[in-house]
Amino acid sequence: MQLPHLKPKKQHDLTSEDIVFHDIRKKGILGNLDKRRTIMESLKRNARQGRTDVQITEEDLRFKTWQEQMNPSSTAVVLAMMDTSGSMGTFEKYMARSFYFWMVRYLRRKYSQVKVVFIAHTTEAKEVTEDQFFTKVESGGTRCSAAE
């Protein structure tokens, strides 16, 4: 087929932080209190003593400990394209903006190295800011190939 020998592009060594809970201890801060294990310890202690009521004491408290873990990551670009012309009705614009709003929130929460590029089009396509993408209203016709 006489195709040229393609060399792989140089990969950037990117990492992202992740928090992993890996151990249970008897001492810690209240923000890391493991409620389920604390109640189980209290139930075990009260059962050993023959009590039927549940009383939680200092010795019953169990705390989660966590560690920051570095995971390999990669970059990505997501293109968000939306028709902002007058041919889109109020409901259609609402649905499109709602979808893109939640998509962007999910991507930014789940992936730290993602870039979202917003493209709005009427008779011609142009890159806009996020605020303009979600608030821009225009009138006029639409050409289907404008956002290509």
Image: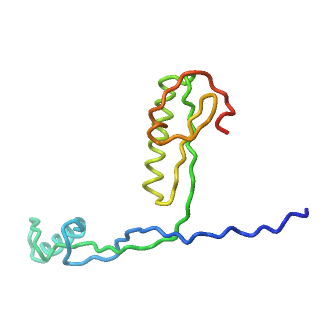
Residue 98 x %, y %: 45, 36
Which of the 4 image quarters holds residue 57?
Answer: bottom left
Q: Residue at x 47, y 42 (%)?
A: 130
Q: Nearer the viewer, residue 59 or 75?
A: 75
Left or right of 99, for residue 41: left
Q: Split into 4 quadrants, where in the image is the N terminus?
A: bottom right
Residue 106 x %, y %: 45, 50
Q: Split into 4 quadrants, where in the image is the C terminus?
A: top right
Q: Nearer the viewer, residue 74 or 135?
A: 135
**Residue 76, above or below 23:** above
**Residue 28, above or below 81:** below
Left or right of 98, for residue 121: right
Q: Residue at x 62, y 35 (%)?
A: 125
Q: How is the image coloured?
A: rainbow
How many labels, in total?
A: 0
Q: Residue at x 58, y 69 (%)?
A: 12
Q: Residue at x 11, y 74 (%)?
A: 58
Residue 25 x %, y %: 24, 78
Which residue extends farthest right?
Answer: 1
Which of the 4 image quarters holds residue 135?
Answer: top left
Left or right of 145, for residue 128: left
Residue 102 x %, y %: 44, 43
